[in-house]
Amino acid sequence: DIRGFIFDLDGVLTDTAEFHYLAWQKLADEEGLPFTREANEFLRGVSRRESLLLIIGNHKKYSEAEIQEMMERKNRYYVESIENISPADLLPGALPFLDELRQAGIKIALGSASKNARSVIERLAIASKIDAIADGYSVEKPKPAPDLFLFAAQQLGLQPAQCVVVEDAGAGIEAALAASMWAIGLGPVERVGAAHIVLPSLAYAAWSDIRAKLENVVR
Ligand code: XGP
Ligand code: MG
């Protein structure tokens, strides 16, 4: 039976995916690298370094020092942009769903590729609702590898099969399935259709419905 939920952060609990996009766009513009909102879809769930490498593609050659500098620059833009986020920036449904799960005795972890996850959680004022954090510092291999979610489950003291991952990224759904966990995808089926359950957002998430649906999935 299901004992834990592992939530991605950016694009799931709050729309920081948009702030990441704007920060990457600014960097790309400064570097003369082509980048669009559509291209940003591929950065969902992807680590800072991998995101930058995807943006650079084959367009230019950069030294390792230049890559480091660009990662720092993008992060400065991002950190500036999240300075003013508050509990009002939680996405619709996020807070009631977290509370519903906690009341049902479900453990909750964060599973985010971001190194900024802790500071975002503090600003959203939901740190007290989260039992364990797996973030951009926790493991070596980023999503779609299962490592981050396996680390989160371990922190919760649960087996993978007892955990449900909630993700907005294709790479995140892949990682959840690779970890042998249940997966709930938020967003369009083209992006998260591989998940066991697809919902438009957490505003449509109810624990009793989800449990009933997952109990009927044969795996
Ligand atoms: P961090 C971020 C990436 O920069 C961003 O491209 C990803 O979309 C995001 O993580 C996914 O959660 O990582 O720069 O905040 O460490
Ligand atoms: Mg995400």
Image (cartoon, rainbow, N blue to C red):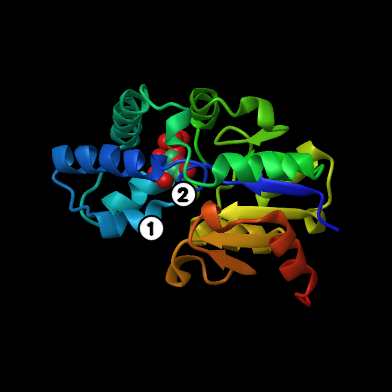
Q: On the rendered structure, is 179 left or right of 21?
A: right
Which image quarter holds the N terminus?
A: bottom right
With 133 as the anchor, is 192 left or right in this view?
A: left
Query: Residue 64 placed where, x, y %?
Result: 35, 36
Location of residue 129 in the rendering, given as x and y in whole percent from the top left corner: 67, 31
Quarter for ligand 1?
Answer: top left
Q: The disc labelled 1 sits on which kind of residue?
A: Phe
Q: Position of residue 41 (x, y in %)?
A: 36, 57
Q: Is mark 2 within 8 Å of ligand 1?
A: yes
Which mark, residue 205?
A: none
The reply to whether residue 48 is in sight is: no
Query: Quick check: 75 above or below 10?
Result: above
Q: Is residue 188 visible?
A: yes
Give me the disc on residue 46: 2
- Pick whichever, 118 or 101, lies toward us: 101
Q: Residue at x 55, y 48 (%)?
A: 142
How far from the left and from the top, in percent, is residue 110?
Answer: 63, 39
Name the residue carrying label 1: 42
Label 2 secondary element: loop
**Horizontal placement of 21 versus 90: left or right?**
left
Mark 2 touches mark 1? (CB < 8 Å): yes
Q: Identity of the amino acid at label 2?
A: Val
